[in-house]
C-alpha cells in the first residue's frame, strides 16, 4: 500500500525556492531532481503520518503541517545530497521583517483564541493573515516554538481546565472545544495534566485549600 501526498503547485514552488531561489522563475517545473535520499527519521515520520491518516486520528490542521514538514525535509535532503549550501532559513526569511513575523504569529494566536473549537485549517488561517500556508507554518513555529496544531491543542486543554473547574460537563467541554469524542478528549487531557477530567474539580479544590 502506498500513500501519496499531493501539494498545490504554488506551495511546492515556495518550498523548493527555500533551497533554490530560481525555482520561483520556473513555477511549472520547480524541482531540479526527481528523486532524493531521505533519512531514517523522515521515513519513520512518513509512516507515522500514514498510520494516523488510516486511523483518522489527526485533524486537517495537523495533517497539513506534517505533510509540509515532510516535503521540506525531502527537498532539503536532496539539496544536501547535491552539495547545495543555500539554507532554508536564509531563503525563506530573506528580507521579511522580524516584526512582520511576530505580527503574523500573534494574529493567528488571536484567531485561535477567538474560536478554539473551530475546525481550523492551515489554508484558512493563512488566508486570514494574507500569507502562504508554508510561510505561516514556518513563521508560527519559529515564533512560538511549536506547530499551530500543537498550540491549538494546548489552548483547548487549558480552556478545558477552566471550564471543568466551573462545573461544565465533560461531554459539553469536549464538544465545544472541538475534540472528536469524549474519550479522545479524556486521553489527551490525562496525557497533558496527569489527571482525568473527572478529577479536575477535586484537584483545583485541593490547590486552593
Image (cartoon, grey):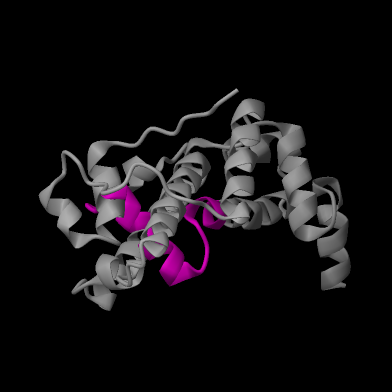
User: Going 82% across and 54% down the picture, which residue do you hit?
Assistant: 201
Number of marks: 0
Boundaries of the magenta span? 127-152
Looking at the image, which residue is at 15% across and 53% down? 24
Residue at the far front in the pictured view: 82
Q: Which quarter of the figure is the N terminus placed in?
A: top right
Q: Is residue 151 magenta?
A: yes
| Left or right: 6, with 118 as reference point | left
- Decide: is 20 above or below 47: below
Q: Residue furthest top?
A: 1
111 left or right of 98 in image:
right
Question: Residue 2 colored magenta?
Answer: no
Residue 168 location (% of width, % of height): 71, 43
Q: Is residue 20 left or right of residue 170?
A: left
Image coordinates of residue 122 in percent, x first then y, are 39, 44
114 w.r.t. 176: above or below: below
In front: 169, or 76? 76
Q: Quadrant of residue 49?
A: top right
Residue at 28% over, 77% down: 98
Q: Position of residue 3 (x, y in %)?
A: 53, 28
Point out residue 121 in the picture as x, y percentages from the top left corner. 41, 40
Q: Main secondary structure of the magenta part?
A: helix
Is any atom of residue 83 visible in this view? yes
Quadrant containing the C terminus in the rendered view: bottom right
Amino acid at each position: 500500500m502506498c500513500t501519496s501526498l499531493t501539494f498545490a503547485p504554488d506551495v511546492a514552488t515556495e518550498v523548493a525556492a527555500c533551497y533554490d531561489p530560481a525555482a520561483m522563475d520556473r513555477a511549472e517545473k520547480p524541482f531540479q531532481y526527481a528523486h532524493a535520499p531521505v533519512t531514517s527519521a523522515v521515513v519513520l515520520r512518513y509512516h507515522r503520518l500514514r498510520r494516523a491518516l488510516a486511523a483518522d486520528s489527526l485533524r486537517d490542521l495537523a495533517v497539513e503541517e506534517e505533510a509540509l514538514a515532510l516535503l521540506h525535509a525531502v527537498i532539503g535532503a536532496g539539496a544536501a545530497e547535491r552539495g547545495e549550501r543555500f539554507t532554508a532559513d536564509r531563503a525563506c526569511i530573506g528580507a521579511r521583517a522580524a516584526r512582520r513575523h511576530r505580527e503574523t504569529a500573534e494574529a493567528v494566536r488571536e484567531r485561535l483564541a477567538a474560536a478554539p473549537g473551530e475546525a481550523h485549517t492551515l489554508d484558512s488561517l493563512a488566508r486570514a493573515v494574507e500569507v502562504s500556508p508554508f510561510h505561516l507554518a514556518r513563521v508560527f513555529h519559529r515564533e512560538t516554538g511549536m506547530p499551530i496544531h500543537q498550540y491549538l491543542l494546548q489552548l483547548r486543554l487549558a480552556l478545558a481546565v477552566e471550564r471543568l473547574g466551573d462545573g461544565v460537563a465533560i461531554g459539553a467541554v469536549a464538544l465545544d472545544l472541538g475534540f472528536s469524542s469524549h474519550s479522545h478528549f479524556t486521553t489527551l487531557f490525562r496525557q497533558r495534566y496527569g489527571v482525568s477530567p473527572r478529577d479536575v474539580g477535586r484537584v483545583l479544590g485541593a490547590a486552593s485549600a
